Image (cartoon, rainbow, N blue to C red):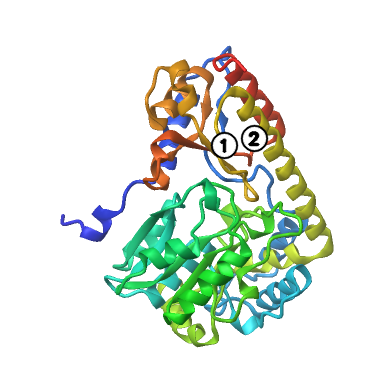
Amino acid sequence: MRISERAQAIEPFFVMEVAKAASRMAEQLGADDWPMIYLNIGEPDFTAAPRVQARAKEAIDKGQSQYTPALGIDPLRDSISKWYGSHFGLDVPSSRILITAGASSALQLACMALIEPGDEMLMPDPSYPCNRHFITSCGGVAKLIASGAKSDFQLSLASVQDNWGPKTRGVLLASPSNPTGTTIDFDELKKIHAFVSAQHAITLVDEIYLGLSFQEPPAKTALALDEQIVSINSFSKYFNMTGWRLGWMVVPSELVAPIERLAQNLFICPSAIAQHAALACFEPESLALFEARKVAFRERRDYLVQALLDLGFDIPAQPQGAFYIWANCQPLYGALGVSNSWDFAFELMRQTHIAVAPGRDFGHNETEHFIRLSTASAMSALVQAVERMKTIFKP
């Protein structure tokens, strides 16, 4: 059977490969062994809010499980529009809010609507690997730009200008970012978008962790700049609905019809039950719960960042949101007898039964010396992980 070049060009998602190895090891552990602690995947330990779960049951009981419009049900689009108003003080018309089968389908739809074969999209290095694969799957080129701690691992106007070329179609940013948890400076984002707009190009911003920004005052959405921003969002992270596969995108008015045609053909519609359930996300009881959970995520970040520093890790940029810590493990290679973060992750797993994500997935800019740790697990798991690491890395 002939496999397409497109499929062959897509690299494995190595985070999931590590997860499989961790699961195999966990199955082999005995009763007296430490149980596996998973700090490798960004999935909140919190489940969907109680009202969301109840609303899903109501939807099933009422038979609300048939096809919906391709762009989602109007009440949900209206609820998100009101959320932008109450949460960010923005008037985002519901007509520009398109419900999708997760943020992944939103990114795929955006790339298919905007990118031609050979088009380049500028991205920071490191960045989330699946985002660049959406670009390449449409025939585009994800051009990774080395971005360091000085810019919080985000693109700057200077780096965008220096790397802009005749084939550049735009930029794909993420704020807060996976894997670094850093947020792009809003004034820098404004400058980047002004430059990109002057080239008649695209500013595409992954904002799926925007609700989990720990900054004071809270981070602004890129949508505050103008109506030409394409913003991707999700119910997975802030709303704790990972497996429900529901997201949304906000697009310029002229993109609505083209994306609707693509969505009709590729996805039919997002999950009807998930959409009806998600209406409960915007009830006061649920919103209060999400904010309380955000405080818990911030407390976990604060604890683990300091604990890792005490153990000897180098964390060159403080995570400002999401639930990730991008840590340089090179200072600790000697304790494990390794020379890169890939071997570090597997040796750490072998000795402590802690799974972390090696930097291999996230680009090429010194990623061979970094690991990503997720603080999506309960505080008790983080404390236990630190105690295990203390047996190897003497603080």
Which residue occupies 46% across, 36% down?
Answer: 370
Frontmost residue, 112 versus 32:
112
Q: Label 2: how many residues lie within 10 Å, few (<14), some (14-19) or many (20+)? A: many
Q: Which amino acid does label 2 sit on?
A: Val
| Residue 243 % position (x, y) | 57, 53
Q: How many labels does the image show?
A: 2
Secondary element at image label 1 = loop
Is residue 286 shown above or below 30?
A: below
Can residue 239 be seen from the camera position used here? no
- In the picture, the quarter occupied by the C terminus is top right
Check whether the beta carbons of the residues at disc 2 and disc 1 lie within 8 A of each other: yes
* Label 1 crowd (10 A; few <14 / some 14-19 / many >=20): some
Is residue 181 toward the left or the right of residue 297 in the image? left
Taking 30 as reference, is 129 left or right?
Answer: left
User: Which residue is at the far top?
Assistant: 32
Q: In which quarter of the image is residue 317?
A: top right
Q: Tell me the residue that label 2 is attached to.
A: 305
Between 384 and 58, the one lying in front of the other is 384
The image position of residue 6, as x and y in percent, is: 26, 60
Query: Which image quadrant: the N terminus?
Result: bottom left
Task: Identify the residue position indicated by label 1 in the image.
Answer: 315
Q: Can residue 236 be seen in this view?
A: yes
**Which residue is located at x 24 percent, y 53 percent?**
8
